[in-house]
């Protein structure tokens, strides 16, 4: 008896909005879904726009919890200062005894108070406070897209030599980015599920096809569909694959 495991890619297509030849409107800054209160103060002659976002507070809390979880795992392996070298960890640590590092609850609590707060320095005196925030949000979206291209979609390095293959690789990456943003829009803006891109791919990546050979039969089955997988697939309008994908008699 033998078994092999491979990713199971859901099959199904949906038409994307925007047909060829349709007139395209110039993109405009999109108003945030959350009404973020903002104000400004003058600091040393510069305008500082300040604000608070509950969504950002939730994100800050989640990111800190993940970071502290990774940090604790490192400390469990080695609590020596040399064993924890990442600068992002240092603000949560304190020395215990002569040579052991531990997480400082007081430092964690101190940073919790800043969850959701943000500020932007600007020399622009004509834009309103909300326009300043919207502009930086658009900038963050652009930077995030480049990060996704380089990390999630692996735009670089390009292991090709001819110009045609390089262009083809980059085109596939940008099409993948378009599909990724379409998935985000469908799930978070239309279905209101509030799931990050990494979480979406993390859940979908768990759907696998298993090939089992036994008793002169070859059976291809999918892994169990979790509640999260079911929610995402239904939100995207993708039919859930059957439990048994293929069954053949082997001589």
Image (cartoon, helix red, strand yellow):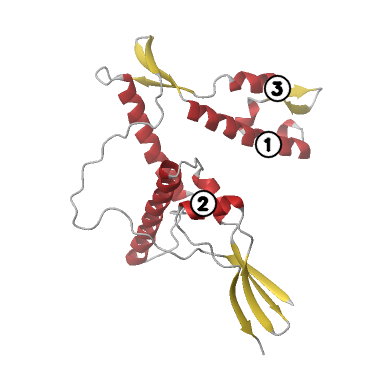
- Tell me the distance, in whole angstroms, between the alpha carbons under discs 2 and 1: 26 Å
CB contact under 8 Å: marks 2 and 3: no
The residue that appears at 65% across and 23% down in the rendered structure is 108
- Front-most of 187 and 153? 187
The answer to whether the residues at label 3 and label 1 have Cβ atoms under 8 Å apart is no
Mark 3 Cα within 10 Å, few/some/many (few <14, many 20+)? few
- Distance (Cα) linking label 2 and label 3: 36 Å
Q: Nearer the viewer, mark 2 or mark 1?
A: 2
Residue under circle 3? Answer: 105
- Residue 138, quarter of the rendered image: top left
Determine which of the numbered discs, if any, sits on residue 232 in the image. 2
| Image marks 2 and 1: residues in contact by CB distance under 8 Å | no
Disc 1 element: helix
Q: Which quadrant of the structure image shows residue 132? A: top left
Q: Quadrant of the N terminus?
A: bottom right
* Mark 1 crowdedness (10 Å alpha carbons): few <14, some 14-19, many ≥20: few
| Nearer to the camera, 209 or 69 | 209
Q: Nearer the viewer, mark 2 or mark 3?
A: 2
């Amino acid at each position: 008896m033998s078994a092999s495991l491979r990713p199971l890619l859901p099959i199904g297509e949906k038409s994307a909005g925007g047909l060829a030849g349709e007139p395209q409107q110039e993109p405009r800054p999109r108003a945030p879904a959350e009404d973020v209160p903002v104000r400004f103060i003058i600091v040393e002659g510069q305008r500082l726009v300040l604000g608070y976002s509950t969504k950002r507070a939730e994100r800050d809390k989640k990111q800190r919890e993940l970071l502290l979880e990774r940090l604790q795992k490192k400390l469990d392996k080695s609590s020596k200062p040399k064993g924890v070298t990442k600068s992002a960890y240092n603000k949560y640590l304190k020395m215990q005894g002569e040579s052991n590092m531990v997480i400082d609850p007081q430092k964690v609590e101190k940073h919790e108070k800043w969850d959701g707060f943000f500020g932007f320095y600007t020399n622009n005196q004509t834009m309103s406070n909300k326009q300043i925030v919207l502009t930086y949000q658009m900038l963050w979206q652009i930077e995030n897209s480049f990060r996704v291209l380089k990390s999630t979609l692996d735009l670089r390095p390009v292991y090709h030599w001819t110009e045609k293959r390089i262009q083809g690789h980059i085109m596939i990456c940008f099409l993948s980015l378009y599909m990724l943003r379409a998935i985000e829009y469908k799930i978070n803006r239309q279905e209101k599920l509030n799931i990050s891109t990494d979480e979406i791919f993390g859940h979908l990546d768990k759907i696998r096809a298993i090939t089992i050979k036994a008793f002169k039969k070859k059976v291809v089955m999918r892994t169990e569909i979790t509640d999260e997988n079911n929610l995402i697939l239904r939100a995207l309008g993708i039919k859930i694959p059957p439990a048994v994908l293929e069954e053949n008699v082997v001589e």
